[in-house]
Image (cartoon, helix red, strand yellow):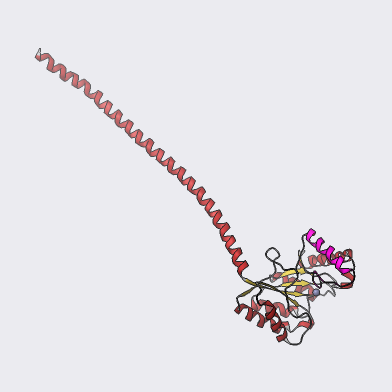
Amino acid sequence: MKKIWLPTVIMLLLLALPVLLLYRSHQQLLSMEETQLQEERRQWQLIDRIEQLKKQEEILQEQNALLQQEKQDLVIRAEKQVYLTFDDGPSVVTEDLLALLLELHIKATFFVVGANPSEYKESMMRRIVQEGHSLGNHSYSHRYSTIYSSKEAFWQDFMKMEDYLFEVTGIRPMLTRFPGGSRGSYSNRSMDVMEGLRGDMDRLGYIYVDWNVLGGDVSSDDPDFFVSEVLRQVQGKTNATVLFHDTAANREILQAIPLIVEELRAQGYHFAALDPKEYFVRY
Ligand SMILES: [Zn+2]
């Protein structure tokens, strides 16, 4: 009996061994698969998380760009700005004026007229644009008695100038300044005409600008007159739009402007060409 038992046990053990081994390797395989699955799941979770973070990053970048823009706008608005504007040109002074502005690194605004056209004047109009200044329509004739006699007369003259500027410079300026300003009265009828014209301008998308610093409306032989007048009127203003005249009678501005610029820069002012999208002054 004992002799049979032992071999049987050995036999059974020998038979069980492969089963056990098979079972163990199967278990190992299962746990490996499980580990692999866990690893894959972890990777998917990481990919998801990366995607989420990427989206969050994009949103933050957009918000950041908006904040930067806002900050920049505020800085610009907080800065003290001077807009030099020159009416009634081009004139014999324009060439020297452009050279001076270039030397001073200043962009300005020219409200030009078309009367008595010449090749020189047209080349000045082109240089105004090429050198980064703003160009505005200041009517063709600048003759109050004609342009303010009726709305029709004004628009005929104004469009003649617009077409002329387009022909010469390739630009149809939306920026404009009424000869004499938007609140002037030049005849018994002109107040009504002006009111109608202001409405027309708004409806048609033109931006008319006036000024809040009068840089010597009358001709003066004394450059110091321009300097003291402008500095006095700019005082306390965050945005100063200075009216000068680009005419032969105002050549003194060439001496006055460097002094004005030096003093106002020392006071923290910046000089810029008018951009109606940013700021403009009206009475
Ligand atoms: Zn004028």
Residue 57 appears at what percent x and percent y?
50, 51
Pick whichever, 132 or 123, lies toward us.
132
Q: Position of residue 6 (x, y in %)?
A: 12, 17
**Where ligand 1 lies, by image quadrant?**
bottom right
* Percent position of residue 223, x then y: 72, 86
- Please give the range of residues in magenta: 180-203
Q: Give percent across and percent down for residue 119.
A: 80, 74
Residue 81's place in the image compared with 65, above or below, is below
Q: Which quarter of the figure has residue 33?
A: top left
Tell me, yes or no, whether the highlighted magenta stretch contains residue 33. Answer: no
Looking at the picture, tell me which residue is in the foreground, 144 or 11: 144
| Residue appearing at x 41%, y 41% in the figure | 43
Screen quadrant of the C terminus: bottom right
Q: Looking at the picture, does residue 167 appear above or below residue 245?
A: above
Quarter of the N terminus within the rendering: top left
Residue at 52 percent across and 48 percent down: it is 55
| Residue extending farthest bottom | 222
Residue occupying image coordinates x 28% and y 26%: 23
